[in-house]
Every structure is written in structure tokens, then in C-alpha cells.
Amino acid sequence: MDRLRDLVRFYETLAKLKERVGGCRKLAACDGKMSWPRRGVYFFFEKSELRSDSGSGLRVVRVGTHALKEGSRTTLRKRLRNHKGIKSGGGNHRGSIFRLLVGAALMRRDGTPRVPSWGQRSSAPKEVRERELALEKKVSAYIGAMPFLWLEVDDEPSPRSLRGCIERNSIALLSNWGKPESGAIDRPSKAWLGRCSDREKVCQSGLWNSNHVDAGCDNAFLSELAKLVSQM
């Protein structure tokens, strides 16, 4: 019951964030003219994934941030652009674990296109990337249609940053990994693509995340989250 109470509070805070930023955006509709905070945390939803226990509305399916290594210059805009892909519809799954996970699940669900090189190595020559293009386009279309919210958290890059704390604890709170059937909250729908993932942590957690899904949650982060939202 404590976790359910915390999830209700979490989603109430995201509802306030949605009001503050003027609604969700979709990456497919984002262009270079849109303004973004320099650093932050993002929360992705899926249109067909509904909350069933903590209230009504869409459930969060991915939480992420960036620049957790000291000295990193990655901005929120750049991280979201990595997930979105490029103007032609393609993208680079080697630069986005989100894209990698979605692409692998699409392959397992649909059977085609089969891309043996998917997720292999940190870089690939042009001919390999050309063979991956059809799947990259599918990934771009899938992620591009997902509504998301963003929260400004402009602290310095560090593993101990507040952004990292919010990301880690949000994932831990949302995750159904390791929970008994009676303890699972806001289960993914039977048709959720993540059920086709080759990562057990994605399948069981109900999130497009593999890090932190098995971590404990310090619900003190909820007060920090609410404070940051009030400052947006």
C-alpha cells in the first residue's frame, strides 16, 4: 500500500508538471525551434498503456536523463534527439539504449526485418547501417509517437546529481520487477511491445529501462520532484 500511495503522489506531481509545461510533446513533432532546458529528466508514456491501479491516464514507460559523468556536455536536447533519430526517419540505436530496446522488441514481435547486427559493436560501417535502416525507421516512428514530459534539473554532471536521483528512484518506484502478482501495480497491457523484449528486466518491470528496475526506492525523492515541478 505504501508503494501505491507513492505512485499516486508521483502521478499527481506529473499532472502538475504537464500543466506547467503546457502539455506533453511528441518527438516526431519536435523541431530545432523548440526551446528546452539545458539539463533535465524526461518521462515517456505510450498511448495504449493505461494505469490500472494508481488512477486514470497513461502510465510512464520510460524515465531517463543525461550527463551523469563528470565533465559531460550532453544536453537534454541532444539526448532527446538521439532517441528521436534523424530527419530522414533513420537513427542510430548505438547511441540510444531506448532505440536499441525498442528495435529488438520489434524484431521479435514482427519477425522482419531481421537485423543480425542490431546492438552489435559501438559503431558500424556504412553498409551495415544501410541494412539496419528499415528497422531504424520503424523505431523512429514508434518512439516519435510517444507522448513525453520533461523536467528541468540544471545541476552539474555527476553520478550523484539530483537528476540521477530522480531518474533512479522514479524507475525503482514504477518498476514491477521482482514483485509478486499481488504486488504488481499498473501492469503493462498484454499487447505492450515491451513484452516482446529480449531483456527480462524490460518484460517484467513494464518499463523501457533495464538499469535501476531492481533497485530500492527512497520515496524522499518525491518531495524533491514536487519542489522542482513548482519551480518550472
Image: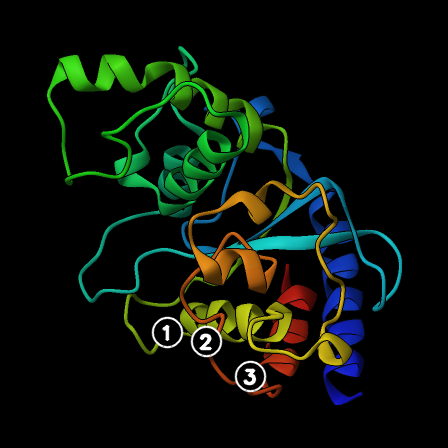
Q: What kind of element bears circle 1?
A: loop
Circle 3: is it few (<14), some (14-19), or many (20+) Cα within 10 Å?
Answer: some
Q: Which residue is mark 1?
A: 161
Taking 9 as reference, is 93 left or right? left
| Rendered location of residue 221, percent (x, y) | 58, 81
Instruction: Please identify the residue farthest to the right as the structure is shown.
Output: 56
The amino acid on which the numbered mark 2 sits, given as a three-letter code, is Cys
The amino acid on which the numbered mark 3 sits, given as a three-letter code, is Cys
Residue 91 or 221: which is nearer the viewer? Answer: 91
| Rendered location of residue 175, percent (x, y) | 59, 69
Q: Which residue is mark 3?
A: 217
| Residue for point 37% across, 40% down | 100
| Residue for point 32% across, 34% down | 93
Instruction: Please identify the residue farthest to the left as the structure is shown.
Output: 125
Circle 2: is it few (<14), some (14-19), or many (20+) Cα within 10 Å?
Answer: some
91 in relation to 221, above or below: above
Point out the frontmost of discs 2 and 1: 2
Closer to the N terminus: mark 3 or mark 1? 1
Residue 72 or 129: which is nearer the viewer? Answer: 129
222 in relation to 232, above or below: below
| Rendered location of residue 178, percent (x, y) | 56, 77
Classify the position of the C terminus by image quarter: bottom right
